[in-house]
């Protein structure tokens, strides 16, 4: 019987990986807080949405890799940090009378997209996955938290519907990570290069309103029932 990946992939992360995952978790959690506030959820709902945004992609990645226990189960301190962050963010927004807007949510979301792309691709590389699989694992880590956040908030996930490049930015960033490894850059430099490229591409897509073509139904198609 093959040895399971749980025993072959070390759980210990490097300091640079821990730093990247921590900042990415904070960024996506903030995007979840803003989205939950936009939907006028109560405090419990906002914390749940923030948790899905912060931990959802990494959870799906770890399930695909058969890594046990899940990263946030093994490091329960991150759950406490998430709760403190949510409460602090809610109190700050109310005290400052800040209006949660979709545009405000996009900036921490773009940062989290880049950082989780880098971290997830690195974990795929550490697991000995083929290059394209490592890149896809980075995409899963970066994209699925936002997908779960939007689904719970009764939105068609923005990753699939707003037509501005999102998953494509993550896909590109994953290959930047592979190229940085091939160039034998230090791990921290590879992580920063991949995260920076992904985030910069997403920010440019938002600011410049780059659009992917939407599906256009032909006149000959029968109407949907």
Image (tube, rainbow, N blue to C red):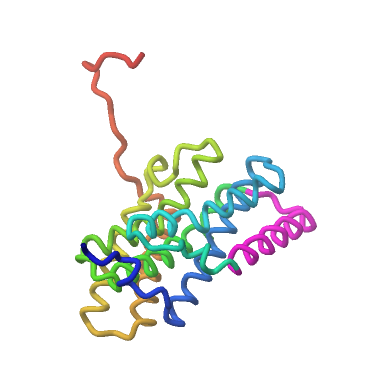
Q: Is residue 8 left or right of residue 53?
A: left
- As for residue 38 lying within the magenta part, the answer is no
Q: Quadrant of the N terminus?
A: bottom left
Q: Quadrant of residue 189?
A: bottom left
Position in image of residue 211 (x %, y %): 35, 46
| Relative to 213, 100 lies left or right | right
Residue 109 in the image: above or below residue 152: below
Task: List x then y, in percent, for residue 32.
Answer: 58, 52
Relative depth, front residue between 214 and 175: 175
Image-quadrant location for residue 135 = bottom left
Q: Is residue 197 left or right of residue 38?
A: left
Tell me the quarter of the image containing the C terminus.
top left
Whether residue 104 is visible: no
Q: How many marks?
A: 0
Residue furthest to the right? 95
Comparing 174 with 221, the one in front is 174
Dominant secondary structure of the magenta stretch? helix
Q: Position of residue 218 (x, y in %)?
A: 23, 22
Q: Is residue 38 visible?
A: yes
Q: Residue at x 37, y 58 (%)?
A: 61
Give the vertical position of 104 relative to 112 (above or below).
above
Q: Which residues are magenta?
A: 77-100
Q: Residue at x 24, y 71 (%)?
A: 128
Residue 19 x/y as whole percent: 49, 77
Residue 80 within the magenta-colored segment of the rendering: yes
């Amino acid at each position: 019987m093959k040895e399971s990946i749980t025993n072959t992939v070390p759980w210990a992360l490097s300091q640079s990986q821990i730093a990247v995952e921590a900042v990415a978790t904070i960024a996506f959690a903030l995007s979840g807080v803003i989205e939950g506030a936009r939907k006028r959820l109560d405090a419990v709902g906002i914390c749940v949405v923030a948790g899905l945004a912060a931990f959802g992609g990494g959870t799906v990645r770890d399930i695909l890799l058969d890594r046990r226990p899940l990263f946030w189960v093994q490091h329960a301190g991150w759950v406490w940090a998430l709760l403190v962050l949510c409460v602090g963010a809610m109190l700050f927004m109310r005290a400052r009378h800040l209006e949660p807007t979709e545009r405000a949510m996009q900036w921490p979301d773009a940062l989290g997209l880049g950082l989780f792309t880098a971290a997830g691709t690195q974990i795929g590389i550490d697991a000995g996955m083929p290059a394209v699989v490592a890149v896809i694992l980075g995409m899963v880590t970066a994209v699925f938290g936002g997908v779960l956040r939007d689904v719970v908030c009764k939105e068609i996930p923005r990753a699939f519907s707003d037509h501005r490049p999102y998953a494509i930015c993550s896909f590109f960033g994953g290959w930047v990570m592979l190229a940085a490894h091939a160039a034998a850059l230090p791990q921290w430099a590879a992580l920063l290069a991949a995260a920076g490229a992904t985030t910069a591409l997403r920010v440019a897509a938002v600011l410049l309103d780059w659009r992917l073509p939407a599906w256009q139904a032909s006149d000959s198609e029968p109407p949907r029932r």
